[in-house]
Image (cartoon, rainbow, N blue to C red):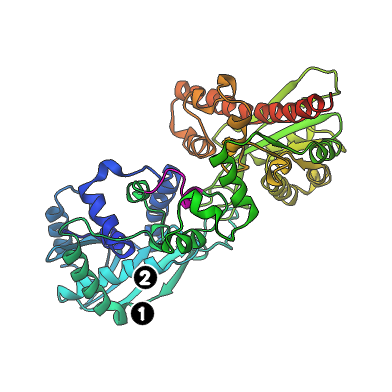
Amino acid sequence: MNLSKSKYCLGIQCHKLLWLDKNKPEYKEDINNESVLDNGTMVGIVAKNIFPNCIDIKYNDDLNIMINDTKKEMLKENVYITEASFKYKNNFCSVDILKKEKDYLTIYEVKSSTHLKDIYYEDISYQVYVLKSLGYNIKNAYLVYLNSNYIRKDKLELDKLFLFKDVTNFVFNNLDNVKNNITAINNDTKKEPNIKIDKHCFKPYPCPFFKYCTRNLPANNVFNIRRMSNDKKISLYKKGIYSYEDLLKENIDIKYKEQIDFTLNNKEPKINIKKIKEFLNTLSYPLYFLDFETFQESIPEYQDVKPYMQIPFQYSLHYIENENDFLKHTEFLGNGNVDPRRELAEKLVQDIPKNVCTLAYNMSFEKSVIKNLAELFPDLSEHLMNIHDNIKDLMAPFVNRSYYVKEMEGSYSIKYVLPALFPNNAELNYHNLDLIHNGTEAMSAYADLKKYPPEKKQIIRKNLLKYCELDTFAMVKIWQKLKEVTNLMNV
């Protein structure tokens, strides 16, 4: 098999994953987050600026052209080359940044993460193996990654943004393992490998072929149990305990058995009127329903931002002044050109008065956003923290399963709760929205907003507003459903 550094890493995770990626790509699920890929690209581009006068080897589908271009640049002395490309037998690699000085080479592998994973060490070991096999003398090998503690001020300080980990000793000691791994991969991928489900299906990355590999399991199997750790699922699976019927016989948490019981026996909804009433009695008018959308940047564009910090750019706010009043709505969406946080915070304190009850779904997220805004803007801090301290969590009745139906499938996420409570309701179906259907798509759309011409920008903004508005409207409907079931069951 022709290997690259990415394919080698797939093989390290699972030989079958690598074989399927080559031979059965039609079974591959799209589990990649586009914004994550974009962040990775951006980190690689910015990292090049750490090194002086980098010579870039341009990508070409014909790898031989990249290899030949590299050879030409390697004739120069004391140069930095990006995407320097090499091939030893059927093993190809492009080095993120290569430093050539006299007869020595130093390799820098750039990662868009704020922490180092074991697979990164394997990645750079493979590259050193290829170069040393070609006769190059490697002086040092470094992993370059983002400093999670770096806070941008006026200027981007690359020497503080990036951290360097010298992995030379590890890599040199790992080269025999790389050679053995390459041999094993080639021997084991001549046909589809017979590899069973195990921890490698989830680490270091979720496998995009997991559905293919579990296709022969019962539809109701252990991997569909919500909130159970992957390690626990694997442990049960290895014991041959994976059908719902098998799981019911096991000593597992009651919440897992409840999901199984409701599914197998098609049980009627579980509604604890007392607990739901207790929750509803903690709420008061005027009542506000709040939802934020945020995005993350690997390379901080704005002041007072860390890598991958959640930056709020939008909110939707439905509210009801009193029990007999009409539902009202307001919202905010940044323009995509400047840091949206100050304007968002100012409008939020205008829209939500002090000492009122605000509902969020999974309030820890909304509270963390507000707390960060309060720390950033001291003049708004008192009002923002007042909002923060008066937030209630609409998710609570579903977390403790005061309200549970089998269609929730063991989850209390709003994306499961909403369709379970309102089946076949087109008005509440996120799939009926245009362009933006979930938070990940909203994040990516806003991050790219400034790239588009005005006409397309307006279309995207319109759909971002519709998506976020549905989030809080959905919360209103869930709240009304809780009131409705308690009233009906009192009659």
Instruction: Name the residue rendered at 62%, 47% in the picture.
Output: 258
Which residue type does callout 2 highlight? Tyr
Compared with 366, 248 (above or below) is below
Q: Quick check: 155 left or right of 272? A: left
Q: Is label 2 in contact with label 1 (beta carbons under 8 Å)?
A: yes
Q: 412 or 79, which lies in front? A: 412
- Magenta stretch bounds: 217-224
Rendering coords of residue 179 (x, y %): 21, 74
Compared with 193, 353 (above or below) is above
Is residue 298 visible in the rendered image? The answer is no
Which residue type does callout 1 highlight? Phe
**Quick one: SS at disc 2?**
helix
Name the image quarter holding residue 67.
Answer: bottom left
Label at residue 121:
2
Q: Quick check: 245 left or right of 132? A: right
Q: Quadrant of the N terminus?
A: bottom left
Rendering coords of residue 467 (x, y %): 57, 28
Rendering coords of residue 74 (x, y %): 18, 66
Name the image quarter holding residue 330.
Answer: top right
Magenta segment includes 98: no
Are there few (<14), some (14-19), or many (20+) residues within 10 Å of tag 2? some
Label at residue 358:
none
Label at residue 170:
1
